[in-house]
Image (cartoon, rainbow, N blue to C red):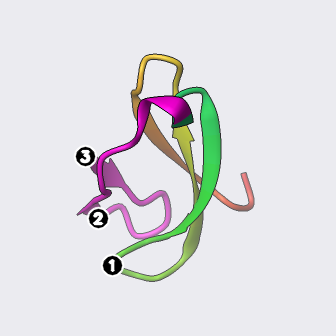
């Protein structure tokens, strides 16, 4: 799955999300700039990113 970093705006790959993780959040570091972010996994498995300070 591809996600865009909210800090550097680069896209990077995230490994496939397991169905049991749908509807949750997890801390993650951008694969490009290494800044912390939050991955938000929607109930439908859609993936979003959010900066730690948002």
Residue at screen point 69% across, 61% down = 52
| Image x and y of residue 15, in percent | 30, 56
- Sooner in the amino-acid sequence: mark 2 or mark 1: 2
Which-is-in-front pick, marks 2 and 1?
Answer: 1
Q: State the mark number for residue 32.
A: 1
- Disc 2 and disc 1 in contact, CB within 8 angstroms: yes
- Name the residue that disc number 3 marks: 1
Q: Secondary structure at mark 1?
A: loop
Asked if residue 53 lies left or right of residue 19, the reply is: right
Residue drawn at point x = 36 percent, y = 61 percent: 9
Q: Position of residue 53 (x, y in %)?
A: 74, 60
- Which residues lie in the magenta part? 1-20
Mark 1 closeness class: few <14, some 14–19, many ≥20 residues within 10 Å: few
Q: Nearer the viewer, mark 2 or mark 3?
A: 3
- Cα separation between marks 2 and 3: 14 Å
Q: Residue at x 56, y 40 (%)?
A: 40
Report the Cα–Cα distance between label 1 and label 3.
Answer: 15 Å
Q: Is residue 17 magenta?
A: yes
Q: Position of residue 50 (x, y in %)?
A: 58, 49
Count of numbered circles on the image: 3
Which mark is first along the chain, 3 or 2? 3
The overriding secondary structure of the stretch rendered in magenta is: loop
Q: Is residue 29 left or right of residue 4?
A: right
Q: Which residue is mark 2?
A: 10
Q: CA distance from mark 2 to mark 1?
A: 7 Å
36, 45: nearer the viewer: 45
Q: Residue at x 62, y 53 (%)?
A: 26
Quick one: label 2, few (<14), some, or many (20+) residues within 10 Å?
few
Above or below for 35 versus 28: below
């Amino acid at each position: 799955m591809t996600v865009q970093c909210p800090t550097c705006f680069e896209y990077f790959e995230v490994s496939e999300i397991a169905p049991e993780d749908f509807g949750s959040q997890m801390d993650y570091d951008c694969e490009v700039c290494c800044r912390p972010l939050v991955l938000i996994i929607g109930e439908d498995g859609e993936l979003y990113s959010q900066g730690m300070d948002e």
